[in-house]
């Protein structure tokens, strides 16, 4: 069974605030849910499928369905970190194709600034005693991948910095972005080292916030007075630490990307816009290579060419500013990647960064760490005809 043409994204909403001190995580989930449903022209009573990940409080999908008063016949709480929400859209499309639901709501929310919680890896995790006892951190493990990529392929800090520069050029047009100042390569290189070779401006922001999308059947979409975005292809894959024999220079996109492209029936030349997970600048470079937009090892040169800059670059990316400049709610950036891809396909991105005649968009999420284990999920979306 293929999901191509089986479902469409009819509603999308991003919380406008980057600090939300007066709300609970559950309240933010509910706010973005109502926002996405309103965008689609629907209400909570129309929802018969609900999807959320580990950022949802309590019993996750069960607690949030109860909190929002949902009467659903299908629940999914797949947890793959920041890539979860792209996986959810694929799962929602599959559930709709199988007749399990018709209106699927996917929500994400978090308050890491206003109400920080425990880290992603707890002492009960099987890897904890082998890794965390040595003082590993999220930045240090991404730095390990960056240093290996530099060793293998000659990638430079200046090339990585161009990812941040492109994101900042886009974020200046986003009134809700946390960081709206345009930066230069020199600014990035001269910012303090966080974990060699990654500088502070190589790292994503930390914000409160959230977002939601509504995935519907074609029959429902026809009844709505809203431009919907077709789900064309989906792929997901984990990459493990391979019992210590990990290759730090590639991501799970090596496997998730080809699955999505094959199901969508499109080629790289067909992609007009790409939302690429950008927890760190190295994440973007490796992911672009693994998705097949350039050969392995040439990601640094690819981004340094200006390819990521909208609207006229070869692969305009993250036109909202991405995780590097706009927001990174719940320390998970996958949902916002879907949201900006939907805006581009609807022609609703800021005019300064709107890709002309945007018909096919790719959104990719990363969960976990490039230095250990991770989950990748790739979506290919199309403008409804």
Image: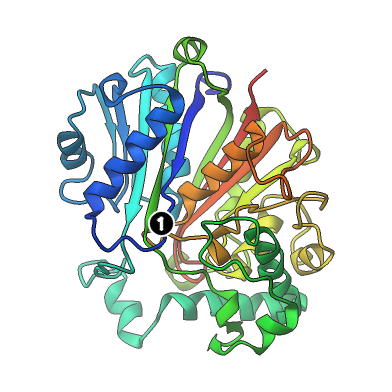
> Could you say which quadrant of the image residue 52 lies in?
top left
Residue 53 lies, in percent from the top left, at: 32, 47
> Could you say which quadrant of the image residue 122 lies in?
bottom left
Toward the front, the furthest residue is: 175
Q: Between residue 185 and residue 20, name the one nearer to us.
A: 20
Residue 375 lies, in percent from the top left, at: 46, 53
Is residue 93 something one can see in this rendering?
no
Residue 51 lies, in percent from the top left, at: 33, 36
> Could you say which quadrant of the image residue 232 lies in?
top right
- Horizontal side of 247 relative to 45 (left or right) equals right
Q: Quadrant of the C terminus?
A: top right
Is residue 200 something one can see in this rendering?
yes
- Horizontal side of 237 relative to 130 (left or right) equals right
Badge 1: how crowded within 10 Å, few (<14), some, or many (20+)?
some
Q: Is residue 73 above or below residue 28?
A: above
Residue at x 23% of width, y 59% of height: 22
Q: Between residue 229 and residue 36, name the one nearer to us.
A: 36
- Horizontal side of 307 relative to 1 (left or right) equals right
**SS assignment at label 1:** loop
Tell me, what colour scheme is on the image? Answer: rainbow
Residue 3 lies, in percent from the top left, at: 52, 23
Q: Is residue 219 above or below residue 130?
A: above
For the image, the number of numbered tags is 1
- Horizontal side of 309 relative to 29 (left or right) equals right
Q: Between residue 214 and residue 16, name the one nearer to us.
A: 16
Residue at x 38% of width, y 55% of height: 209
Residue designated by label 1: 17
Q: Between residue 47 and residue 3, name the one nearer to us.
A: 47
């Amino acid at each position: 069974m293929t999901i191509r043409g089986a479902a469409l994204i009819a509603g999308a909403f991003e919380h406008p605030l980057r600090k939300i001190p007066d709300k609970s995580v559950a309240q933010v989930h509910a706010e973005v849910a109502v926002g996405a449903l309103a965008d689609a022209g629907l209400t909570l009573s129309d929802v018969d499928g609900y999807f959320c990940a580990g950022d949802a409080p309590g019993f996750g999908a069960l607690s949030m369905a109860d909190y929002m008063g949902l009467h659903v016949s299908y629940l999914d709480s797949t947890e793959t970190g920041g890539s979860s929400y792209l996986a959810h859209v694929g799962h929602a499309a599959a559930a709709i194709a199988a007749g399990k639901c018709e209106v699927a709501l996917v929500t994400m929310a978090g308050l890491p600034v206003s109400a920080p919680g425990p880290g992603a890896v707890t002492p009960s995790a099987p890897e904890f005693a082998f890794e965390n006892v040595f003082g590993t951190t999220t930045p240090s493990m991404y730095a390990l991948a960056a240093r290996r990529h530099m060793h293998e392929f000659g990638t430079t800090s200046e090339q990585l910095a161009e990812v941040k520069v492109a994101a900042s050029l886009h974020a200046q047009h986003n009134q809700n972005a946390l960081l709206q100042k345009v930066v230069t390569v020199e600014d990035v290189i001269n910012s303090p080292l966080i974990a060699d070779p990654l500088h502070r401006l190589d790292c994503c922001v930390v914000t409160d916030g959230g977002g939601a999308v509504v995935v519907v059947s074609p029959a429902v979409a026809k009844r709505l007075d809203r431009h919907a975005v077709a789900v064309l292809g989906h792929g997901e894959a984990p990459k493990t630490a391979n019992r210590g024999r990990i290759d730090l220079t590639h991501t799970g996109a090596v496997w998730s990307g080809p699955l999505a492209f094959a199901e969508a029936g499109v080629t790289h030349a067909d992609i007009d816009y790409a939302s690429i997970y950008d927890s760190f600048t190295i994440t973007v470079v490796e992911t672009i290579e693994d998705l097949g937009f350039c050969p392995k090892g040439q990601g640094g040169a690819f981004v340094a060419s200006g390819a990521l800059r909208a609207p006229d670059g070869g692969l305009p990316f993250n036109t909202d500013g991405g995780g590097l400049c706009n927001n990174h709610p719940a320390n998970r950036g996958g949902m916002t990647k879907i949201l900006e891809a939907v805006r581009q396909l609807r022609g609703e991105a800021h005019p300064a960064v709107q890709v002309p005649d945007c018909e096919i968009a790719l959104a990719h999420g990363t969960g976990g760490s490039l230095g250990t284990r991770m989950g990748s999920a790739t979506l290919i979306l199309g403008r409804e005809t």
